[in-house]
């Protein structure tokens, strides 16, 4: 008897869609703008990491401690703490990706840290990258 594979085991849906952060209206429909697929996931990753735990009403478990870690005394273990928090947050809250690498460039003289994050979207072989700046304000 032949073994059958379900299509869902082999392929993952790629129909991701989200509101654009800019909230600019679409010129043809006069509705909110949207981002799709890779850009939607990129936006979601950035939002999750820059949201403070407890900041969203009625969703206290959404977010990360990354911004709070910026204000801890800076020592050799601070980079590792931020990397670990980024990995844990995305593993917990973003099931559509697998984090490949987190690099942190320390510019503590300017009170900023540059984060470079590489991840794979589930079901794809292409590595995506997000780069953003964390500043003490």
Image (cartoon, rainbow, N blue to C red):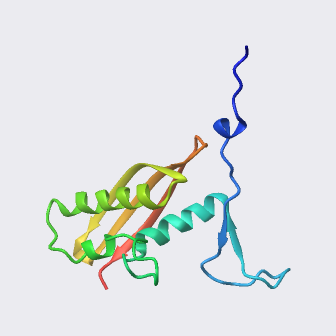
- Quadrant hosting residue 111: bottom left
State how many labels appear: 0
**Apparent side of residue 114 relative to residue 10 in the rendered image (left or right):** left
In front here: 37 or 96?
96
> Where in the figure is residue 94, as x and y percent of width and height?
49, 59
> Where in the figure is residue 121, as x and y percent of width and height?
56, 49
- Residue at 17% x, 59% y: name it: 77
Task: Indicate the quadrant containing the C terminus: top left, top right, bottom left or bottom right.
Answer: bottom left
> Where in the figure is residue 87, as x and y percent of width and height?
37, 56
- Residue at 36% x, 73% y: name it: 134
> Where in the figure is residue 112, as x and y percent of width and height?
30, 74
In front here: 90 or 133?
90
**Apparent side of residue 100 relative to residue 11 in the rendered image (left or right):** left
- Residue at 15% x, 60% y: name it: 76
- Quadrant hosting residue 53: bottom left
In front here: 89 or 114?
89
**Apparent side of residue 71 relative to residue 53 in the rendered image (left or right):** left
Instruction: Find the residue positioned furthest to the top.
Output: 1
- Quadrant hosting residue 124: top right
Instruction: Find the residue positioned furthest to the front.
Output: 1
- Residue at 69% x, 84% y: name it: 24
In the rendered image, the vertical position of residue 40 relative to residue 67, given as above or below? above
Task: Indicate the quadrant containing the N terminus: top left, top right, bottom left or bottom right.
Answer: top right
In front here: 22 or 54?
54
């Amino acid at each position: 008897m032949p073994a059958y594979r379900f299509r869902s085991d082999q392929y993952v849906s790629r129909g991701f869609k989200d509101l654009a952060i800019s909230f600019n209206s679409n010129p043809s429909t006069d509705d909110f703008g949207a981002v799709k697929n890779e850009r939607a996931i990129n936006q979601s990753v950035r939002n999750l990491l820059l949201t403070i735990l407890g900041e969203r009403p009625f969703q206290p478990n959404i977010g990360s401690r990354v911004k709070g870690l910026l204000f801890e005394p800076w020592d050799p273990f601070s980079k590792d703490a931020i990397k670990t928090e980024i990995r844990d947050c995305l593993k917990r809250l973003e099931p559509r990706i697998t984090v490949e690498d987190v690099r942190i460039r320390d510019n503590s003289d300017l009170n900023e840290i540059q984060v470079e994050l590489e991840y794979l979207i589930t079901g794809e072989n292409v590595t995506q990258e997000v780069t953003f700046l964390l500043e003490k304000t």
